[in-house]
Image (cartoon, helix red, strand yellow):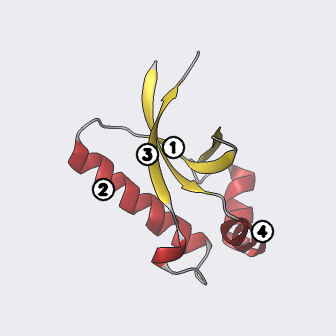
Amino acid sequence: MLKIFIGCELTSLVRSQLRRSKTWQQEKIGSASGLTKTHLNKSEYIGFAATSETLADIITQCQQLEEQILVYCPDLKKGQIRVVCFPQLLVS
């Protein structure tokens, strides 16, 4: 099944902020974040499969992901988080 993946690129800055985040460590252990990791073109991303296919909903979900990352990494600014969308083939 082909899905649209909405993800934040795990740059060295984002990765180091996540390592220092107690909120991220707690939610990661309990899997409460709902985020998964995936790879594309030698880069690693954390995010989720879009739950809707309309452009307005995807834009909203991109904003929600950015806000979620900012909760885990409050020292980051919006411009330091790169949220992207790309197709992903899910095999079940």
What's under tag 3, amino acid-wise?
A: Cys
Q: Which residue is mark 2?
A: 60
For mark 4, give the secondary structure.
helix
Q: Pointers 4 and 3 in contact (CB under 8 A)?
A: no
Mark with earlier residue (1, 2): 1
Mark with earlier residue (4, 3): 4
Position in image of residue 72 (x %, y %): 61, 71
What's under tag 4, amino acid-wise?
A: Arg
For mark 1, give the secondary structure.
strand
Mark with earlier residue (3, 2): 2
In this rendering, which labeled residue sits more in front, label 3 or label 2?
Answer: 3
The residue shown at (51%, 81%) is 77
In this rendered view, identify the residue nearer to me: 41 or 33: 41
The residue shown at (72%, 65%) is 15
Q: Which residue is mark 3?
A: 85
Whole-angstrom CA distance, mark 1 to mark 4, is 20 Å
For mark 3, give the secondary structure.
strand
Whole-angstrom CA distance, mark 1 to mark 2, is 13 Å
Q: Which residue is mark 1?
A: 48
Mark with earlier residue (1, 3): 1
Position in image of residue 88 (x %, y %): 51, 30
Whole-angstrom CA distance, mark 4 to mark 3, is 24 Å
What's under tag 2, amino acid-wise?
A: Thr
Residue 20's quadrant in the figure? bottom right
**On the picture, is 4 further left or further right than 37?**
left
Q: Is residue 17 above or below residue 35?
A: below
What's under tag 1, amino acid-wise?
A: Phe
Mark with earlier residue (1, 4): 4
Position in image of residue 59 (x %, y %): 30, 54
Q: Which residue is mark 4?
A: 19
The residue shown at (43%, 45%) is 85
